[in-house]
Image (cartoon, rainbow, N blue to C red):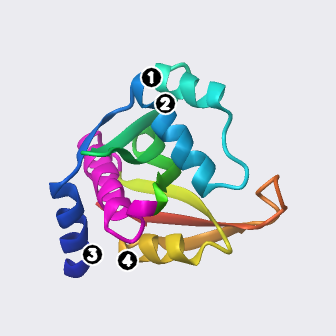
């Protein structure tokens, strides 16, 4: 990761705390999910993720105003898969996404992960830039991946030894 990237993440992280989501966070998570995605996950699915009924984890970034962002990811060493990362619109472009991504990388490294994968919409240039600045590289395209509009997904990965 480049220094400017880490500095922005560190600045945001200084005002944030990171933790596993609880059901008390569900309203905040759903507000962000609905604001950021045209096809948001159903509330019941998010609740199941928080309860740990799936095979993934949901972590939140919290500041004085509540949930500022969240991420959903799976860890199956030596790999991890970032499934969803979203930031409240008022906190976008303020380092919260970078801080969440850096948190993810720290967590999965500690668990023996050497490669992280994710999919991102071909049209989501802001997210693509975030991931590229973190060192992710495009490895594939999944044609028609997104069911809501048939958009392609770019498959990205980040690998370290």
Q: Is residue 89 magenta?
A: no
Graded by Cα atoms within 10 Å as few (under 14), some (14 to 19) or many (20 or more), the crowding at tag 1 reads some
Instruction: Specify whether residue 122 is in view.
Output: yes
Observer-side mark, 2 or 4, equals 2
- Per the rendering, the mark at residue 5 is 3
Which comes before the other along the chain, label 2 or label 4?
2
- Identify the secondary structure beneath mark 2: helix
Question: According to the image, label 1 marks what residue?
Answer: 23
Instruction: Specify whether residue 2 is in view.
Output: no
Rounded to the nearest angstrom, the CA distance separating label 4 from label 1 is 32 Å
Q: Is residue 106 magenta?
A: yes
| Contact, mark 3 vs mark 4 (Cβ under 8 Å) | yes
Graded by Cα atoms within 10 Å as few (under 14), some (14 to 19) or many (20 or more), the crowding at tag 3 reads some
- Identify the secondary structure beneath mark 3: helix
| Contact, mark 4 vs mark 1 (Cβ under 8 Å) | no
Q: Main secondary structure of the magenta part?
A: helix
| Contact, mark 2 vs mark 1 (Cβ under 8 Å) | yes
Which comes before the other along the chain, label 3 or label 2?
3
Which residue range is magenta in the image?
90-113
Which comes before the other along the chain, label 3 or label 4?
3
- 72 lies left or right of 61: right
Which comes before the other along the chain, label 3 or label 1?
3
- Per the rendering, the mark at residue 133 is 4
Work out whether 24 lies above or below 95: above
Residue occupying image coordinates x 39% and y 31%: 21
Question: According to the image, label 2 marks what residue?
Answer: 26
Rounded to the nearest angstrom, the CA distance separating label 2 from label 4 is 30 Å
Observer-side mark, 4 or 1, equals 1
């Amino acid at each position: 990761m480049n220094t400017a990237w880490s500095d922005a993440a560190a600045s945001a992280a200084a005002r944030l705390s990171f933790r596993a989501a609880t059901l008390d966070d569900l309203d905040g998570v759903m507000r962000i999910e609905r604001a950021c995605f045209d096809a948001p996950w159903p509330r019941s699915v998010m609740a199941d993720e928080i309860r740990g009924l799936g095979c993934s984890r949901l972590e939140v970034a919290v500041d004085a105003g509540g949930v500022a962002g969240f991420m959903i990811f799976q860890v199956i060493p030596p790999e991890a898969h970032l499934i969803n990362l979203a930031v409240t619109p008022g906190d976008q472009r303020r380092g919260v996404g970078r801080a969440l991504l850096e948190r993810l990388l720290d967590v999965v490294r500690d668990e023996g992960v050497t490669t992280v994968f994710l999919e991102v919409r071909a049209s989501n240039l802001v997210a693509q830039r975030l991931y590229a600045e973190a060192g992710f590289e495009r490895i594939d395209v999944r044609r028609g991946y997104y069911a809501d509009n048939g958009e392609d997904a770019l498959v990205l990965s980040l690998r370290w030894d």
